[in-house]
Image (cartoon, helix red, strand yellow):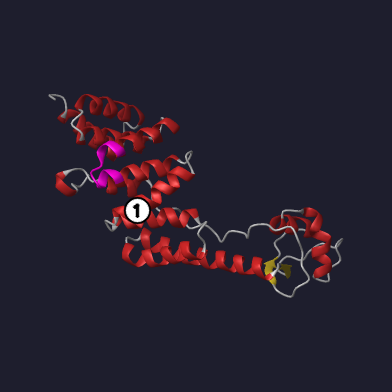
Amino acid sequence: MPPGRHGKTHLSICLLLAVLMVSVPSCRKPAPTYRIVAGKEGYTHSISRGETLQSIAERYYGDRSLGEALGEYNGLDPTAALEPGNTLLVPFDQAELDRIRSVQEAQLLYNRGTVLARTGQYEDAVPYLEQAVEASPAHIDAWYNLALAYQRLDRLSEAGDILKRLANSFPSEHTYRYSLGAVLRDREEYKDALEQFKKALEGDPRYAQARYALALTYEDLGKYKQARREWQKYLEMDPDSTWSEEARLHLESLRSR
């Protein structure tokens, strides 16, 4: 792996190779609400093959029993089959409709920012991701990708703040612990980084990237016995990859220490 600051292996490179930007998903459905309102605004739904009024009501409102009312609202016979390709209006009150539009806007911004980040255009990606989390503060993937982009731009304090919140809010998501550890290691806060990698491995002992990072951090701290142990564990999990070649070089360099 290429050397990083101060001649040390730069885990940021490892991080972005192992934990790439979250894939761009299709636009997510709006969160369900439990009412049909008699307004003229709503969410336009394009009917897919096999859908029914009941399944559409369940998707948007979380309640299949609202299918009949949804059909009546659109002037449809609730017992008739729906024609694929046609559209119907799924009504919401204005506050809910505004929230849905905000979520959709955030998703478009997120998609654009993630594409730019995946092609290494981090400076250009950050404004889109920042706008995405502003439009939809609950968009966890946007927050995570924003943190990774900050990290690649050496904005480590901002990246660390986001990842700490994610790791504390979602303790079972071991990727957040690993990513936070990577940022802390970039900041040369090795003891704190070590704890994050350990927590990631407590949740998933087969998390190879976290094992690799743990071994590197033990080296940073001059704990060569522990580093040798972790390199050996890593090679048991990953004996045949580019990373394993690097692990063997590290292990060999520690033989006399």
Q: Quadrant of residue 242?
A: top left
Please tell me whether residue 18 is drawn above or below residue 50 in the rendered image.
Answer: above
Residue 51 can be seen in this image:
no
Is residue 183 part of the magenta span, yes or no? no
Please tell me whether residue 238 is drawn above or below residue 101 in the rendered image.
Answer: above
The front one of 74 and 95 is 95
The front one of 230 and 167 is 167
Residue 97, x across and y down, in percent: 65, 68
Q: Residue at x 45, y 43 (%)?
A: 168
Left or right relative to 63: residue 210 = left
The C terminus sits in image quarter: top left
Residue 202, x across and y down, in percent: 42, 30
Left or right relative to 12: residue 4 = left
Q: Which residue position holds label 1?
A: 159
The N terminus sits in image quarter: top left
The front one of 179 and 253 is 179
* Residue range corresponding to the magenta coloring: 184-192
Identity, as a three-letter code, of the amino acid under mark 1: Ala
Residue 35 can be seen in this image:
yes
Q: Quadrant of residue 86?
A: bottom right
Left or right relative to 182: residue 36 = right
Q: Report crowding for label 1: few under 14, some 14 to 19, many 20 or more residues within 10 A (C-alpha).
A: many
Q: Residue at x 47, y 61 (%)?
A: 133
